[in-house]
Image: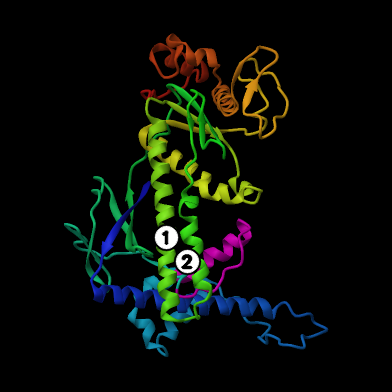
Amino acid sequence: MLTLTYEYKANPTPEQIQLIEHTLNICRKVWNFALCERKDWINSRKSPVNACSIACEYIMSADAPYPNYNKQAKSLTQAKKHYPELTTVNAQVLQQVLRKLETAFIDMKRKGMGFPRFKNWYRMRSYVYPQLGRGELLRGNQIKLPQIGWMEYVKSREIPDGFVIKQVRVVRKASGYFLMFTLECNAKVPDIFPGGHPVGLDLGLDKFVATSEGALIERPRFLQTLHRKLKLLQRRLKKKHKDSNNRHKLNRKIARLHQRICDTRKDWHFKLAHKLCDNTGMIFVEDIDFRVWARGMFCKHTLDAGFGQFVSILQWVCWKRGVYFAKVNKDYTSQVCPQCDTHTGKKDLKDRIHFCRSCGYTTHRDVAAAQVIRNRGINALGRSVEQIACGDVLMGTGNSLVKSLRSRKKGEEARIYPAS
């Protein structure tokens, strides 16, 4: 099963905008009530058996069951009899809010994420239609949504043949409303076979990307270019009264500026990823947890560069264009010579030139690290740099691919995919 997500700019009417805002408000109330119910149940179990708090204490029956998704979904149906405003929103939309809260509590234990928080008007920004019903869904540049009806959107690209719209998420951003289509196709896509020209990438703050071919790409300062304006607006926000119209207007202005920075960064990442995939068969990067970088000395510059987002986008673009993508070990990439594989010692941040005393190889420090990454990626595939560089035994071409497959899988049927 192949799943894709396409995002489109929506053009709702004023009546549809009012319905969307009303739905977001009801979803926010359901989230906060369900979260408060779970939080009270947890706090009622924290009191010691021999002492009670002087300030306050949560009193709840000892045999009260934990309010999980099934309990809260059942109580939501009963609450519609006492709160008629819940009936004005699609029932499946409210169920998805409870399911999202259940996922947040599961991720808190499974992934070590923080405790779910209450949502104000700014934090509840989207809701999802898990089912769109039967009948005609698309008509030109319009889509039929439950309770909203036909809504126009900017059809920036066609939906691929064979894909079916399974669900639609309505998202409110600073620049307007967007529709995110979840598309599914009953097809199996084979894994990309390694072959073609290999390239290693080294990410850093001095140079955003250094390739094993010697290319050095500067790091754009997305936040720094608009930081002065952003700082001025945030200073003005501090003097505004809470819940005032001027504060809401200034908040929207700051949000639009943040979104402009985010969109500019994402667009540049996509363009760079496509450029790196040109005339490339394999791409190797370091397996780094960039969340650690975001807590270091250069956390502001690391978050501005968006390394984690770029690696995710690069992996997606490689899959889309048939380029093999892999991550390699990150340890000591800047302390090894790519020519003779000799340990050259630790370098300071000010040392930007790699020089090997054993073989005399000299190049830029980041380029040498990218070449080490490329060598490690090739070695992980069971090949050598000389075999990849030599044309007659290039991976994925001619009889060399057949020989390598036969040597690895003797007596097994192997399907040979064309090289990128």
> Where does residue 335 sit, x and y in percent of width and height?
68, 26
Q: Say left or right for 309 vs 286.
A: left
Going by the numbered disc 1, the residue's amino acid type is Leu
Q: Mark 2 points at which residue?
A: 233
Q: Give the range drawn in magenta.
A: 97-121
Closer to the camera in the image, 308 or 134: 308
Separation of marks 1 and 2 at Cα, in angstroms = 10 Å
Q: Can residue 204 be seen in this view?
A: no
Q: Name the residue under label 1.
A: 257
Closer to the camera in the image, 369 or 127: 369
> Where does residue 64 sit, x and y in percent of width and height?
63, 82
Considering every residue shown, the one lying at the far top of the view is 392
Q: Can residue 203 be seen in this view?
A: yes
Q: Is residue 127 above or below residue 393?
A: below
Q: Say left or right for 314 vs 102.
A: left
Q: Is residue 105 magenta?
A: yes
Q: What element carries label 1?
A: helix
CB under 8 Å between callouts 1 and 2?
yes
